[in-house]
Amino acid sequence: MNYRHAFHAGNHADVLKHVALLAIIDALARKEAPFFVLDTHAGRGRYLLGGKESQRTGEAQGGISRLLGQAQPVPPAVERYLRAVEAVNPVGALIAYPGSPLLAAQAMRQQDRLAACELQPEEAAALKEVFAHDGRVAVHARDGYEAMHAMLPPRIGAVKYARGLVLIDPPYEAQDAEYPRIVAALRDALSKWPTATYAVWYPIKQRRSLLPFFRKVAALPAKSALLAELQVRPDDSPLRLNGSGMLILNPPWQLDAALAPALPALRQSLGEAGGSTRLEWLKQE
């Protein structure tokens, strides 16, 4: 696997993914009982936006940098995300971008736990450094799909976790071949931990290519499934990342209401002509 997220950190896809991620975790944290988060493709946890990878693509300029530079007020879910990014940077500067595991750990409480999986040795080593002094977080240098099979339902010591989130964010190097792996992993995980929320990030190059994936997901034994999409340009090119989406199985109560004003605000800030959003239930209990 050759994918390195450092080339893409802070782009429009990260913005959507992390706005949704924090909204889910904040919803879980509203109840006192502990929850467990499994991040299947965690990356290195923190990305320097001045690094050669980020500078080479400049993708953060069309994502987090542009969003932070907006003067107009933003909806609460977007504001929450911006404050989380600012929390890992010096006041008034954007030096680093926090990946999913770091954002999740920021939002967790003392009683909550995170297992972050990363298969690439260099990325896993960097991730372990990020969390070297955080006893709530365990970093595993292993395949994320295999971890879903082996680690669910989660139990740490005497604590069984009835609530939690599994974030599935693969690099899609195999392109369309990734979707059957996701569906199989979700089916297996739902059979063992049906009460959890499952969030899957997916790229949009041409939306029609996603229809078979959505049909298979709708047939899974989840109570509900929500799609939240942000397209920064029309989906007329299979060679560009025109947008992305979050598929959320068993979403927390009122997550759709939290995301409804956030998506148009992101399109307005980050989108080009022909950009669009979508918030739609694939199935609903």
Image (cartoon, rainbow, N blue to C red):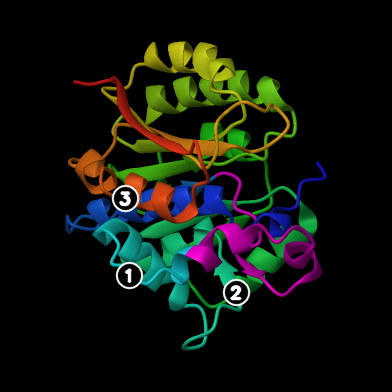
Q: Closer to the camera: disc 3 or disc 1? A: 3
At x 28%, y 33%, the residue is: 195
Does any portion of residue 207 appear in the rendered image?
Answer: yes
The quadrant where residue 7 appears: bottom right
Q: Is residue 273 above or below residue 75?
A: above
Residue at mark 1 to residue at mark 2: CA–CA distance: 25 Å
Label 3 element class = helix
The quadrant where residue 99 appears: bottom right
User: Which residue is most to the bottom?
Assistant: 91
Disc 2 or 3, which lies upstream in sequence?
2
Q: Nearer the viewer, residue 129 or 176?
A: 176
The type of residue carrying mark 1 is Gln
The type of residue carrying mark 2 is Ala
Whether residues under marks 3 and 1 lie with C-beta atoms below 8 angstroms apart, the answer is no
From the top left corner, tell me how far across and down residue 87 is, in percent: 43, 78
Neighbourhood count class around disc 1 (C-alpha, 10 Å): few under 14, some 14–19, many 20 upward? few
Quadrant containing the C terminus is top left
Q: Is residue 229 left or right of residue 144?
A: left
At x 72%, y 64%, the residue is: 54
Quadrant containing the N terminus is top right
From the top left corner, tell me how far across and down residue 255 is, in percent: 24, 43
The type of residue carrying mark 3 is Ala
Q: Which mark is residue 262?
A: 3
Q: Which mark is residue 110?
A: 1
Provide the residue span drawn in magenta. 40-66
Q: Is residue 46 magenta?
A: yes
Neighbourhood count class around disc 3 (C-alpha, 10 Å): few under 14, some 14–19, many 20 upward? many
From the top left corner, tell me how far across and down residue 162 is, in percent: 28, 42
Q: Is residue 44 magenta?
A: yes
